[in-house]
Image: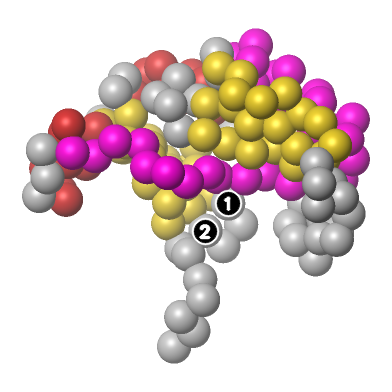
């Protein structure tokens, strides 16, 4: 069994309709959505949106214990222009800017924003990690 992999990322959301509207405004297409959960195909992985109270129940924790964590999710793009364009689409869809895209010390270009539930995303162009035709790390 391969240990270095992630098959599902689940984000707890306060309002499923708002969360789905946000991600779908970015161009994400739900693979399935029913009641308190929606799934988006990531090409070998899934992103799940799950109502926060239901997620807490499944995890055996109080909703207030969940937080959003000290982590980021990231999308890489092929160019700085693509980063800027995607960043603006996310802002128009309801994201909150954290750090506008800029050239960064490691030689790339990146910026961060938070979705309506506070989950932080990094949008980046990394010249050391080329992308294939599907936008996956090559």
Quarter the N terminus occupies:
bottom left
Tell whether 1 sits left or right of 68: right
Q: Which image quadrant for residue 29?
A: top right
Q: Residue at image x 81%, y 60%? A: 129
Q: Percent x, y for residue 63?
A: 16, 34
Residue situated in front as seen by the camera: 36 or 127: 127
Q: Residue at image x 81%, y 31%? A: 102
Q: Percent x, y for residue 82?
A: 84, 33
For disc 1, the neighbor class at 10 Å (few under 14, some 14 to 19, many from 20) is few
Q: Residue at image x 64%, y 31%? A: 112
Tell whether 67 sits left or right of 90: left
Q: In this figure, which residue is indicated by the disc labeled 1?
A: 42
Mark 1 in CB contact with mark 2 (< 8 angstroms)? yes
Residue 68 painted magenta? yes
Q: Percent x, y for residue 138?
A: 80, 66
Q: Which image quadrant for residue 24?
A: top right
Write the start and end of the magenta stretch as one range: 65-93
Residue situated in front as seen by the camera: 35 or 56: 56
Q: CA distance from mark 1 to mark 2?
A: 5 Å
Q: Is residue 32 visible?
A: yes
As drawn, 119 above or below 125: above
Tell whether 60 sits left or right of 111: left
Q: Which image quadrant for residue 62?
A: top left
Q: In this figure, which residue is indicated by the disc labeled 2?
A: 45
């Amino acid at each position: 069994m391969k240990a270095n992999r992630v098959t599902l990322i689940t984000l707890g959301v306060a309002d499923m309709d708002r969360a789905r509207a946000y991600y779908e405004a970015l161009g994400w297409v739900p693979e399935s959505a029913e009641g308190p959960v929606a799934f988006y195909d990531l090409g070998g992985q899934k992103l799940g949106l799950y109502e926060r109270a239901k997620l807490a129940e499944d995890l055996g924790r109080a909703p207030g214990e969940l937080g959003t964590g000290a982590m980021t999710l990231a999308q890489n793009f092929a160019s700085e222009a693509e980063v800027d364009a995607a960043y603006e689409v996310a802002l128009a869809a309801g994201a909150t800017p954290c750090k506008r895209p800029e050239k960064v010390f490691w030689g790339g270009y990146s910026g961060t924003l938070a979705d309506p539930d506070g989950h932080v995303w990094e949008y980046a162009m990394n010249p050391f990690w080329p992308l294939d035709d599907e936008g996956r790390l090559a």
